[in-house]
Amino acid sequence: MAEVPVPVPGPGEVLIEVKAAGVCLSDLHLIDGTLVPLYPDASDAVTQQCADCARRRPCTQVRTRGIDDDGGWAQYAIACEDTLVPIPDELPFDQAAIIPDAVSTPYAAVVATAGRGLDFAFDCAGVPAVREQAAAALGRDGGSPESVSELVRLASDGRLDLAPSISDHIPLAYAAEPIHRLEHKIGDPIRLILVP
């Protein structure tokens, strides 16, 4: 962990004081290099949009938060203003932190398969061939900004309680610990939260 200055937002960006940041298996795979982003999603920072974004084609301009740009494992982070979803007062920060990835991806998989006569919908990530097949079959891969907004509303209205799915809260100073726990499957690390 390194001390860095508080970032300064540029045009169209905002400075965010981070209250909680989710850590999931995708983070482990981004760190170890076994997962390469296929599409920008709710947790990715896209600096420019092109025609492929509107058609949900594989992105040639993906900038992944935490890999290409500084991520949320910090006291402060920068985000593009048009990618933010307000967090209502009723929604705890730790629950809001897991919505963009760990919750919206499986939610989007279930919603995308509704009405297709399927008995099961699986959320598979990490294996490029599987992700490409899922994207071709479903027309998308991962969560969407719409899914994130809908899940924030459901959780803040009390219709969705994500608290039981949070395995632990870990101080930001120990950011390597949740990655170690995920990698070695220590203590049922379903959803881990870093807190500054």
Image: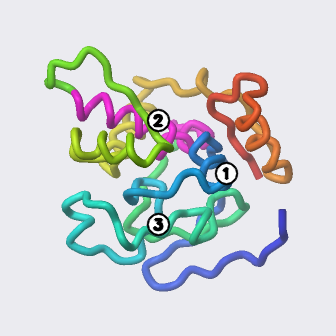
Question: Chief secondary structure of the magenta span?
Answer: helix
Nearest to N terminus: mark 2 or mark 3:
3
- Residue 19: mark: 1
Question: Is 136 rendered above or below residue 189?
Answer: below
Contact between labelled residues 3 and 2, with CB atoms less than 8 Å apart: no
Assign a secondary structure to mark 1. Answer: loop
Towards the viewer: 154 or 4:
4
What segment carries the magenta color? 90-113
The CA distance from mark 3 to mark 1 is 19 Å
x, y percentage for residue 46?
41, 70
From the image, which quarter does the N terminus lie in?
bottom right
Assign a secondary structure to mark 2. Answer: helix
Where does label 2 land, which residue? 103
Q: Residue furthest bottom?
A: 11
Q: Residue furthest front?
A: 129
Tell me where residue 168 sits by quadrant.
Answer: top right
Question: Is 100 rendered above or below residue 106?
Answer: below
Tell whether 172 sits left or right of 12.
right
Q: Residue furthest top?
A: 119
Assign a secondary structure to mark 3. Answer: loop
x, y percentage for residue 65?
55, 63
The CA distance from mark 1 to mark 2 is 18 Å
Towards the viewer: 56 or 73:
56
Where does label 3 land, which residue? 45
x, y percentage for residue 79?
51, 68
